[in-house]
Image (cartoon, helix red, strand yellow):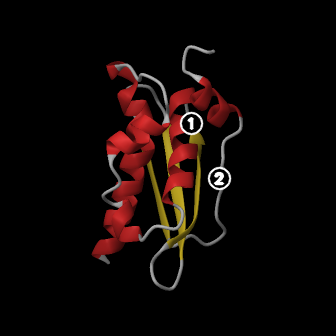
Amino acid sequence: MSVYGDTIQEHSRNPRNYGALEDPDIRHEDVNPLCGDRVRIELSLTSDDTIDVARFQGDLCVIAKAASSLLTEMIAGIPVSRAAEFPEQRLLDALQAEIQPARRRCALLPLEVLRSGVSEWLRR
């Protein structure tokens, strides 16, 4: 077992939903200034504003990449309005490893980007 746990290692080595969407309905990007992680989340929505496809890309550490991969899997099929309220603890639990306080921002960066992008979209 690695220092980060099997789930983090698996999603970092084989990230799900990595890449760009051709014409996303929602696109948002941000950076963690403490470590330099940068992530972009892109969403394609159905006609009833359900998340159809979620993708991510960026320059990410192992934890942020795994969290992005897991998050894009977890939000597919939910109403976009619920994505804005996706619980931090649910994402942290999905990582199946103890995330040290210093690395918590790495794990939550993709969720912050998702929430910001969805919030902007909902205000339109």
Mark seen at residue 66: 1
Residue 103, numbered label: none
* Residue type marked 2: Asn
Rendering coords of residue 37 (x, y %): 49, 34
Marks 1 and 2 sit apart, C-alpha to C-alpha, by 11 Å
The image quarter containing residue 103 is top left
Q: Percent from the top left, x then y, of residue 70?
A: 54, 45
In the rendered structure, the answer to whether residue 111 lies left or right of residue 44 reads left
Badge number at residue 17: 2
Residue 94 relative to residue 117: left or right: right
| Quadrant of the drawing holding the C terminus | bottom left
Question: 109 or 28: nearer the eye?
Answer: 109
1 or 2: tag closer to the N-terminus: 2
The residue at 37%/28% (across/down) is 104
Query: Residue at the spot x=39%, y=39% of the render?
Result: 108
Query: Where is 27 relative to 104, above or below?
Result: below
Residue furthest toward the right? 14
The amino acid pointed to by label 1 is: Ala
Side (left or right) of 72 relative to 89:
right
- How many neighbours does mark 1 have within 10 angstroms: few (below 14), some (14-19), or many (20 or more)? many
